[in-house]
Amino acid sequence: MKVSIDISTEYKEPFAVIHTDKVTPEIQRAVDMLGTNETPVTAFRNEEDIVVLKPDEIYMVRVEDGDTIIYGAKSQYRSRRRLYELSEQLGSKFMQISKTTLVNLSYMDSIEPGFSGTLLLKLKNGSKDYVSRKYLPEFKKYLGL
């Protein structure tokens, strides 16, 4: 597929035009990706297999022993990206709840009081982590507490 970019001050908002004789799966994927504000995330299933994840497939992102681990519904993936980069990429459905953890707010299951004024957040896939005191005010504001 040939790709070209036309940069001009007359364009106030980016738009895409695809010229084709028929809609192929490749064209449909391009339309799907361009039509949403969600940017797919690439990660490694193991050392060799690269997977492309939609933000809706991600429950939590956590830094563990220097590695960025992405938690899906049933699987875990490794990313070479830093937590702040993924936070910027994933957008408003995600919130940082601690120095090392980012969660998809759509998959919250329950919240329990934790130690030292923290909250234990449980997700629908069984993952859980504490909301640290630093991030607690923003989290409570989101919940309307």
Image: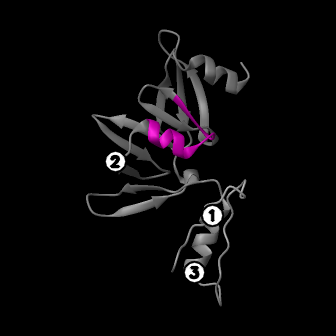
Is 40 placed left or right of 20 in the picture?
Answer: left
Q: Residue at x 36, y 41 (%)?
A: 68
From the image, state whether disc 1 or disc 2 is nearer to you. 1
Amino acid type of disc 3? Pro
Q: Position of residue 79 (x, y in %)?
A: 36, 48
Q: Residue at x 36, y 35 (%)?
A: 63
Is 119 placed left or right of 31 in the picture?
Answer: left
Q: Which residue is mark 1?
A: 34
Residues 120 and 81: in front is 81
| Disc nearer the start of the sequence (1/2) | 1
Amino acid type of disc 2? Arg
The answer to whether residue 144 is magenta is no
| Disc nearer the start of the sequence (3/2) | 3
Toward which corner of the image does residue 110 lie, by quadrant? top right
Q: Which residue is mark 2?
A: 80
From the image, state whether disc 1 or disc 3 is nearer to you. 1
